[in-house]
Image: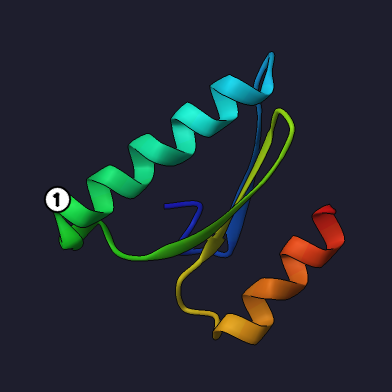
Amino acid sequence: DAIDAGGSIEVYPDAEGAQLRQQYIQGLQKAAPIFGTEYSYLDGPVLVRVSGKLNPTQAAEYEVALG
């Protein structure tokens, strides 16, 4: 899984597409914790997903780099 290995960057045609994808993934994680955890950050049509194995400070560095 790309997220367990570190993360991924997903680019959509518009911000709404990225937002819907983020909401979908968060819904899966709440419904079935077996999928693990991750951090996700949006910037317009870009969704950055980062492994939940990072601590919050480490993960936040990706948000800073994105924005």
Q: Position of residue 11 (x, y in %)?
A: 68, 28
15 shown above or below 24: above
Where is mark 1, residue-wise? 31
Which element is circle 1 on?
helix
Image point (76%, 73%), residue name:
61
Image point (54%, 80%), residue name:
54
The quarter of the displayed image where residue 4 is located: bottom left
**Residue that extends furthest to the top in the rendered view of this protein:** 13
42 shown above or below 3: above
**Mark 1: few/some/many CA within 10 Å (<14, 14-19, 20+):** few
Q: Position of residue 28 (x, y in %)?
A: 24, 45
The quarter of the displayed image where residue 65 is located: bottom right
In the displayed structure image, the side of residue 16 where residue 44 appears, left or right? right
Q: Specify the amino acid type for callout 1.
A: Ala
Q: Position of residue 13 (x, y in %)?
A: 69, 13
In this view of the protein, which residue sits in the foreground, 67 or 34? 67
In the displayed structure image, the side of residue 20 where residue 55 appears, left or right? right
In this view of the protein, which residue sits in the foreground, 31 or 5? 31
16 shown above or below 52: above
